[in-house]
Amino acid sequence: MILWVLPAENIKQRLRCKTKVYPDELPNTSVVIVFHNEAWSTLLRTVYSVINRSPHYLLSEVILVDDASERDFLKLTLENYVKNLEVPVKIIRMEERSGLIRARLRGAAASKGQVITFLDAHCECTLGWLEPLLARIKEDRKTVVCPIIDVISDDTFEYMAGSDMTYGGFNWKLNFRWYPVPQREMDRRKGDRTLPVRTPTMAGGLFSIDRNYFEEIGTYDAGMDIWGGENLEMSFRIWQCGGSLEIVTCSHVGHVFRKATPYTFPGGTGHVINKNNRRLAEVWMDEFKDFFYIISPGVVKVDYGDVSVRKTLRENLKCKPFSWYLENIYPDSQIPRRYYSLGEIRNVETNQCLDNMGRKENEKVGIFNCHGMGGNQVFSYTADKEIRTDDLCLDVSRLNGPVIMLKCHHMRGNQLWEYDAERLTLRHVNSNQCLDEPSEEDKMVPTMQDCSGSRSQQWLLRNMTLGT
Ligand code: LR7
Ligand code: MN
């Protein structure tokens, strides 16, 4: 038998959450759950947990939006089943497969609650999940709130606590990622982990939003298909247009993290996601969209349709630039707010380029013929003097190398490089050695040598833009 033991700090926090008092009068909520070919047990686990673990006076209704599922039991069987539940459950059917974004829009449009709460179709709400979310919205209607997302195993379906020490970010490829809550956010909350965490992005599936604010801020981009991108799009939009996005750490909802998608992506997975990501990059990211385009250069061939309506929305709402977001909301972002170069790093003598060889953490950085196509040969020399590609930084921990790609830590240390734009040298500050061409033994990796001023230690940091 396995006993799960929570660390003492987690237990203390749960107790502090339990003794919090929320106002009696809270806005009520509609819960909107969209699904495509969801399993019966997980869908019903979601619905039952909403009904059993929410005060009914706070639940306006549950809306299930069926995104043209093909499974039989999701038709009449489901309809008959939900008739007997204690809270009104409405089923809406999309006429054709529309994707989760347009399905959510349909659900939201049909809902009546003062707040809209979105959930994936394979969740479990825990006791007390709802009150902290609604209370925060009551305090500030422009705050969009997420619970802590606990983990439900897709093998055993057991429930495991998620972490309150991570928050939402994203990488150059515009993948949503969890990163540690930075010290500045711990300090802002004076160490009180029961206070909401201001998060740069949300995972996307589980959140509550004031229904009028949802409309004011532009709901969703209906031009996005099937899956992906809407979470970052909404996160950027909320912050840039004057709202805020938080993880309310006293609210916990579990989510089944699946190893594979149980459904198809009409048009191809890559194509769909790239299209959605292009739409959000074009509308919200200003010049910083170059980071996305240059690291995944194939993307610029993907047609993303018309985004003029969304650009008009951005103007009408007088939203701030992406640089403001990076500076004020996400200074620890993988995309640097200020940088010296974004492009290849080319050796003057050999004309070869640094190459991350598939972006593997803890491996040596490589050097190959320059291909000028971005991707693995893209690095940014940032104002913080790191040489990074996405979330990995060139790191040297010993005299004479090797040069390794390690997670950027923003602590200077072994990741601090001084570029001399006249001598063209890249000097590693801690070791006081210079980046040099490969040795005879290994022609695939650069070396570290005492700075000599030789041509082999000269590097061109080229600025490239692809797709604009
Ligand atoms: O075509 C579709 N139509 C749908 O109705 C595709 C999906 N869906 C439904 C699907 O049945 C599910 O209920 O949409 C919901 C989300 O799809 P998932 O569960 O396949 O997505 P996910 O959990 O892998 O992905 C996360 O990112 C998505 C990006 O578009 C959405 O924002 C998901 O809601 C989001 N899930 C979460 O945030 C839960 C926590 C995961 C993390 C991290
Ligand atoms: Mn999901």
Image (spheres, helix red, strand yellow):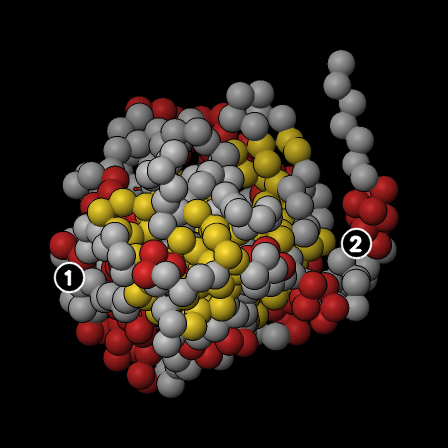
- Looking at marks 2 and 1 on the same chain, the residue that comes earlier in the sequence is marked by 2
**Residue 432 shows up from this direction:** yes
> Which mark identifies residue 199?
none
For the N terminus, give its image quadrant. top right
* Location of residue 289 in the rendering, given as x and y in whole percent from the top left corner: 31, 66
Q: In screen coordinates, is 341 left or right of 55?
A: left
> Which mark identifies residue 305?
1
The outermost residue toward the top is 1
Q: Amino acid at mark 1?
A: Gly
* Location of residue 161 in the rendering, given as x and y in whole percent from the top left corner: 68, 38
Q: In screen coordinates, is 80 left or right of 367?
A: right
Label 1 environment density (alpha carbons within 10 Å; few <14, some 14–19, many ≥20)? few
Rendered residue at 27%/60% (across/down):
348
Rendered residue at 43%/56% (across/down):
435
Residue 267, image quadrant: top left
Check the image and report above or below for 28 versus 216: above
Number of the front mark, 2 or 1: 1
Residue 305, image quadrant: bottom left
Mark 2 to mark 1: distance in Å? 46 Å
Check the image and report above or below for 379 versus 268: below
Q: Are marks 2 and 1 in contact (CB under 8 Å)?
A: no
Q: Which type of secondary structure does the marked residue at label 2 adopt?
A: helix
Look at mark 2 in the image and give the residue it sits on: 17
Q: Which type of secondary structure does the marked residue at label 1 adopt?
A: loop
Viewer-closest of 385 and 214: 385
Check the image and report above or below for 429 versus 337: above
For the C terminus, give its image quadrant. bottom left
* Location of residue 454 in the rendering, given as x and y in whole percent from the top left corner: 37, 61
